[in-house]
Amino acid sequence: MNEEISADNPYSRLVALKKLGVVKNFDEIRKYSVAVVGLGGIGSVAAEMLVRCGIGKLILFDCDTVELANMNRLFYKPEQRGKTKVQAAKETLEAINPDVLIQGRHMDITVVSNYDNFVQVLQSGSLDGHSAVDLVCSCVDNYNARITINMVCNELRLTWFESGVSEDALSGHVQLIVPGVFACYSCVPPLLVASGIDESTLKRDGVCAASLPTTMGLIAGLLVQNTLKYLLQFGQVSNYIGYSAWTDYFSTMTVKPNDSCPDANCLHWQKVVQMEQQNKKEQTSQDAVETAHSDMETKLHEDNEWSIEVVDNGFDTNQSQEMSSSLQDTSTT
Ligand SMILES: [Zn+2]
């Protein structure tokens, strides 16, 4: 990332974050790869923000085409009508920042025969193609797509953000899901699913979901803000952020994983995380004992008024062990 502050450098205002000490390592954003699944009102705007921030690589997934009905929201232009959203987005994003490596996948991730391909793309999605993407941003609008992303991320132990806006366009949420650490999408299913109601039966004839560019833009902003905080490790990343436009109300909370989650991989990672946390706890207490011991030794020898020092007498400790065992041998014979 060019660190020169000049009118010709597109990263000038971002590098300023580093110079001001707000984000010490902003340039590291160039090494990260993020998958954006769903290029609707949230996903397309989130992708644009990531590209303008200089993300290293972006993998875009969507199966729709651009329609005039999308024009009430940001990003797409009327002349892109009829193009796949993946193609239209790739063209726009590459023009905005040619430094970003952008891959587009025009595919329906909910089709069973696409599952392995979806897994493979995420698994080899890093900047160099040798490991998985660093993060998945879910910007899809239906339960089947969310549960598919959940399954893949639990399988690959990928961290992902779930996001969405309500059907009346006036509330939304962003949720961080780290397998085994926080609740996955199956740990706490939406009330609708838990009640056994089929999502498709709720669609009323002639009535489609409403959407506002304002709510979509706000949720996309919260999603990318937390993506930056997560990748560059600054500030606090909330586990769940809810937003209601009715009262300008923002809520945050933490949702722990469910030990009865129906996803076997989620249960597996829960156990792994518990073990990792236990090991970390033991290591921390061991380190604390060692530090206390070394402090005590330093204190004990602080005033060495007799100038006592440890000198090498040329005696090999292996020799000492051999001697001690030979003495033991002698004593038993
Ligand atoms: Zn779960």
Image (tube, rainbow, N blue to C red):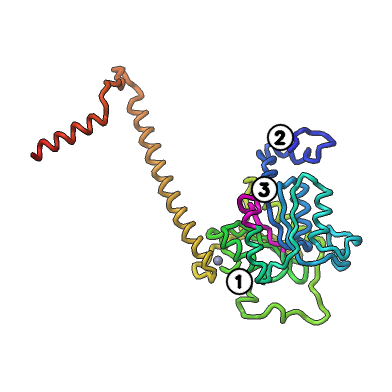
Q: Specify the amino acid type for callout 1.
A: Pro
In percent of width and height, residue 310 lies at: 30, 22
| Residue 301 picture location, percent across and down | 33, 25
- Which x, y percent locates residue 86? 79, 60
Q: Is residue 305 above or below residue 177?
A: above
In three-dimensional space, the C-alpha distance between marks 2 and 3, rounded to whole angstroms, equals 26 Å
Of the residues shown, which amino acid type is indicated by label 3?
Leu
Residue under pointer 1: 189
Label 3 vs 1, first from the N-terminus: 3
The amino acid beneath tag 2 is Lys
Q: Is residue 304 left or right of residue 63?
A: left
Number of other residues with Cα within 10 Å of mark 3, as a class: few under 14, some 14 to 19, many 20 or more: some
Which residue lies under the disc numbered 3?
Answer: 127
Q: Label 1 near label 3: C-beta < 8 Å?
A: no
Residue 19 has which mark?
A: 2
Nearer to the camera, 280 or 103: 103
